[in-house]
């Protein structure tokens, strides 16, 4: 959508669009465009493609190898990737740990890790949630005890997306059991090949494997892998969560997905004279309006000056509204297809060569896959209930 874009931003959009149209082959489009259909190979391929263009870290400053784009340009870039159905690169490196490294990491840590994040050769995962510490992250129990030049880590993480792909984990650990919960946490970088690290797969309700449990048994982590200061990990974790929650809104993908559902509604009406096309189009319009409202909030969040009230608070309503909207759009897809949404995703046949992208993206089983995966959207990154409480405290002061 070009409404309101300055001429320079329109030119930038055209440049991005032309590049993606020329380099993302038809057979790759809408095949690995969302996290539940992502593969390690597709994520690495697209990250490396972007790296060849200098676009692999859209939000990074030029000083650390990023393109130095404005917030508006970043938004345009992600919208164009969604529009063309480009594969989704892993978000844990460029969006999550990368900014932590160049903001709080040592020069040695930056030299060691940033290039592998940019070029897609090194994969990361996030070690935050635990069986007793998900949205209540300050309650985490995984311990790290200093022993000479190492920390010895023991404990468990759960719901760890892409741990089975990862070369490294950025991990929250408890280094002071006596301190106030938030004050006794440190932020460690852990090589996933270290002895004592084990991974157990979790097959989720969408019948896919993108989640894992990770166990640490006397894992020795060099003290040089500590980000910043010991017991100050909560500061770095909050910084990272702000970036994560802003990205969880998924405005670009919502726009594209809803446009495909609009086409599906018309196709359903052609096939079934009893189909309520008017009701479907009214629901489609309602969801489209909500998406554009979310897009306006996203622009405000991206443009907020660092340290401002908007920067501190807007990631939370953006995540809250975006994930609720993802569920509502997924529900709309199921409402359009009804029984056609079966069989279950695990029974999907391989996508035929040359299959129509839009038809594939709104096939019944794919819509069921979206729907089932979306049920977790209001939980990961902080549950909606917790988000509302934190927002109330931030705004009301109590």
Image: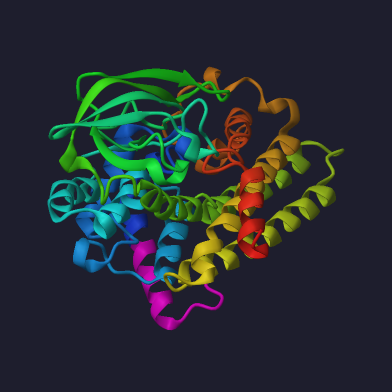
Query: In this rendering, is residue 72 above or below 190?
Result: below
Q: Among all residues in the image, which is located at the extreme right? A: 274
Quadrant showing the N terminus: bottom right
Residue at left offset 14%, top offset 56%: 107
Magenta stretch containing residue 11, yes or no? yes
Residue toward you, 390 or 362: 390
Q: Which residue sits at x=32%, y=33%?
A: 40
Q: Position of residue 275 (x, y in %)?
A: 83, 40
Residue 368, by quadrant, is top right
Q: Could you tell whether 190 is left or right of 111 in the image?
A: right
Q: At which x and y percent is residue 210?
A: 43, 28
- What residue lies at 61% left-to-right and 57% top-to-bottom? 317
Q: Is 186 placed above or below 255 here? A: above
The main secondary structure of the magenta stretch is: helix
The part of the chain drawn in magenta is 1-18
Quarter the C terminus occupies: bottom right
Q: Is residue 264 left or right of residue 242?
A: right
Q: Where's residue 136, x and y in %?
A: 54, 38
Asked if residue 89 can be seen in this view, the reply is no
Residue 309 in magenta stretch:
no
């Amino acid at each position: 959508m070009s409404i309101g874009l300055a001429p320079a931003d329109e030119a930038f959009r055209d440049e991005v669009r032309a590049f993606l149209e020329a380099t993302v082959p038809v057979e790759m489009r809408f095949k690995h465009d969302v996290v539940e259909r992502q593969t390690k190979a597709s994520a690495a391929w697209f990250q490396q493609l972007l790296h060849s263009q200098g676009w692999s870290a859209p939000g990074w400053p030029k000083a650390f190898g990023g393109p130095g784009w404005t917030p508006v340009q970043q938004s345009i870039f992600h919208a164009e990737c969604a529009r063309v159905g480009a594969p989704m690169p892993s978000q844990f490196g460029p969006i999550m740990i990368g900014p932590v490294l160049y903001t709080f990491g040592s020069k040695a840590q930056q030299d060691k890790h940033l290039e592998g994040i940019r070029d897609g050769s090194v994969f990361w995962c996030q070690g935050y949630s635990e069986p007793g510490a998900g949205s209540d992250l300050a309650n985490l129990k995984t311990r790290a005890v200093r022993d000479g030049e190492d920390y010895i880590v023991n404990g468990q993480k759960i719901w760890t997306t892409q741990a089975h792909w990862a070369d490294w984990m950025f991990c929250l650990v408890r280094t002071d059991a006596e301190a106030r919960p938030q004050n006794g946490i440190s932020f460690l970088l852990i090589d996933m090949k270290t002895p004592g690290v084990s991974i157990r797969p979790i097959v989720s309700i969408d019948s896919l494997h993108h989640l894992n449990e990770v166990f640490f048994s006397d894992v020795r982590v060099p003290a040089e892998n500590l980000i910043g200061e010991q017991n100050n990990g909560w500061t770095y974790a909050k910084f990272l969560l702000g970036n994560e929650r802003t990205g969880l809104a998924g405005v670009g993908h919502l726009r594209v997905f809803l446009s495909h559902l609009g086409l599906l509604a018309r196709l359903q009406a052609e096939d079934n004279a009893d189909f309520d096309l008017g009701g479907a189009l009214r629901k489609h319009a309602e969801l489209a309006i909500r998406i554009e409202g979310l897009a306006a909030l996203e622009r405000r969040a991206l443009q907020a000056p660092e340290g401002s009230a908007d920067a501190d608070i807007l990631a939370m309503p953006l995540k809250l509204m975006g994930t609720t909207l993802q569920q509502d759009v997924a529900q709309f897809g199921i409402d359009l297809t009804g029984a056609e949404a079966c069989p279950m995703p695990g029974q999907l046949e391989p996508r035929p060569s040359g299959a129509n992208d839009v038809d594939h993206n709104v096939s019944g089983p794919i819509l069921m896959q979206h729907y089932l995966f979306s049920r977790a959207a209001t939980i990961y990154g902080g549950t909606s209930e917790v988000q509302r409480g934190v927002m109330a405290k931030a705004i009301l002061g109590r």
